Image (spheres, helix red, strand yellow):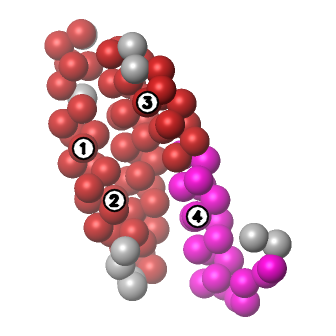
């Protein structure tokens, strides 16, 4: 299992780069897929960071996952109607 977890950083990197590409799309479905891929990359990075003892990375990924969920909600709101000033 440790060898598998040591190798998780590479798929995590590929998923993160792919998610970044998709989130920048003007197509709603691609953007949505990018948000979901970002959440998957957060899980992969958390697994790798926990295994590597990189607690700062684990905390960062938890924070980024929260920001990603916020981005998904805001993106859905703007698709369904006008944005609200709440933030």
Q: Farthest top residue?
A: 2
- Ranked by sequence position, the earlier of labels 4 and 2 is 2
Q: Is residue 50 above or below residue 24?
A: above
Q: Name the residue under label 4.
A: 71
- Ranked by sequence position, the earlier of labels 4 and 1 is 1
Q: Indicate the quadrant containing the N terminus: top left, top right, bottom left or bottom right.
A: top left
Q: Farthest front residue?
A: 56
Crowdedness near tag 4: few (<14), some (14–19) or many (≥20) residues, C-alpha within 10 Å:
few
User: Which numbered marker is on residue 57?
Assistant: 3
How far apart, in angstroms, are the residues tagged by discs 1 and 3? 13 Å
At a point 68% along the width and 77% down the height, the residue shown is: 77
- Ranked by sequence position, the earlier of labels 1 and 3 is 1
Q: Name the residue under label 2.
A: 19
Element type at marker 2?
A: helix
At a point 54% along the width and 55% down the height, the residue shown is: 68
Q: Is residue 4 left or right of residue 44?
A: left
Crowdedness near tag 2: few (<14), some (14–19) or many (≥20) residues, C-alpha within 10 Å:
many
Q: Is residue 58 left or right of residue 15?
A: right
Per the rendered image, the range of residues in magenta is 65-85
Percent across and percent down for residue 48 are: 33, 24
User: Which numbered marker is on residue 13?
Assistant: 1
| Front: mark 3 or 2 | 3
| The magenta stretch spans residue 24 | no
| The magenta stretch spans residue 80 | yes
């Amino acid at each position: 299992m440790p060898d598998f977890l040591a190798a998780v950083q590479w798929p995590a990197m590929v998923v993160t780069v792919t998610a970044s590409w998709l989130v920048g799309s003007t197509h709603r479905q691609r953007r949505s897929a990018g948000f979901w891929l970002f959440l998957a990359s957060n899980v992969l990075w958390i697994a790798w960071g926990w295994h590597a003892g990189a607690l700062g990375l684990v905390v960062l990924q938890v924070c980024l996952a929260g920001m990603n969920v916020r981005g998904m909600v805001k993106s859905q709101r703007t698709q369904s109607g006008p944005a609200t000033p709440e933030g």
